[in-house]
Image (cartoon, rainbow, N blue to C red):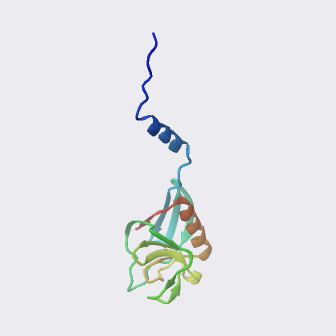
């Protein structure tokens, strides 16, 4: 006995889902900042890939704790408020960003107006990874 095959309305959706499943997954990037230790740990797809010294807010300023999403990337940014260069800036909350600094001698201790400062080469590496991944999560403790 022959059975009649009825096309399913789900056929195109299943084919699309199969195609999506075959695509490589985007990297999940997490930049975890420890304000007490003045260190950043970078995780890509759950694996620890980098540990770097940072500078967060000095006395009289604040680097806010919490979990954020990077919402804007700027290869070169100038802070009009503080009159300083912010290369490879990853903005995660209002004017707060992770960015490179020329004051590398201050890394490892509080020195900023509230942003998270990195060595320029580290900021560039993070910027490139976040850009290629399509975003990142920032966790500040």
- Residue at 43% x, 29% y is 7
The location of residue 130, given as percent across then percent down, is 53, 64
- Residue at 42% x, 78% y is 95
Q: Can you say whether 2 is above or below 64 in the image?
A: above
Disc count in the image? 0
The location of residue 134, given as percent across then percent down, is 51, 61
The location of residue 48, given as percent across then percent down, is 54, 58
The location of residue 56, given as percent across then percent down, is 46, 77
Which residue is outermost to the right?
Answer: 121
Front-most of residues 67 and 34: 67
Please give left or right for residue 136 compared with residue 120 in the image. Answer: left
Which residue is outermost to the bottom?
Answer: 83
Quadrant including the C terminus? bottom left
Quadrant including the N terminus? top left
The quarter of the picture where residue 50 lies is bottom right
- Residue at 59% x, 83% y is 102
Front-most of residues 121 and 109: 121
Front-most of residues 54 and 115: 115
- Residue at 51% x, 44% y is 20
């Amino acid at each position: 006995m022959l059975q009649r095959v009825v096309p399913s309305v789900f056929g195109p959706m299943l084919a699309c889902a199969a195609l999506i499943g075959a695509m490589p997954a985007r990297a999940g990037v997490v930049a975890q900042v420890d304000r007490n230790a003045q260190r950043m740990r970078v995780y890509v797809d759950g694996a620890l890939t980098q540990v770097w010294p940072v500078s967060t807010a000095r006395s009289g300023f604040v680097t806010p704790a919490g979990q954020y999403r990077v919402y804007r990337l700027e290869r070169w940014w100038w802070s009009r408020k503080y009159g300083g260069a912010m290369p490879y800036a990853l903005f995660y909350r209002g004017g707060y960003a992770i960015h490179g600094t020329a004051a590398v001698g201050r890394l490892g201790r509080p020195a900023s107006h509230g942003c998270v400062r990195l060595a320029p080469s580290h900021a560039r590496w993070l910027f490139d990874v976040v850009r290629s991944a399509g975003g990142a999560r920032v966790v500040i403790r």
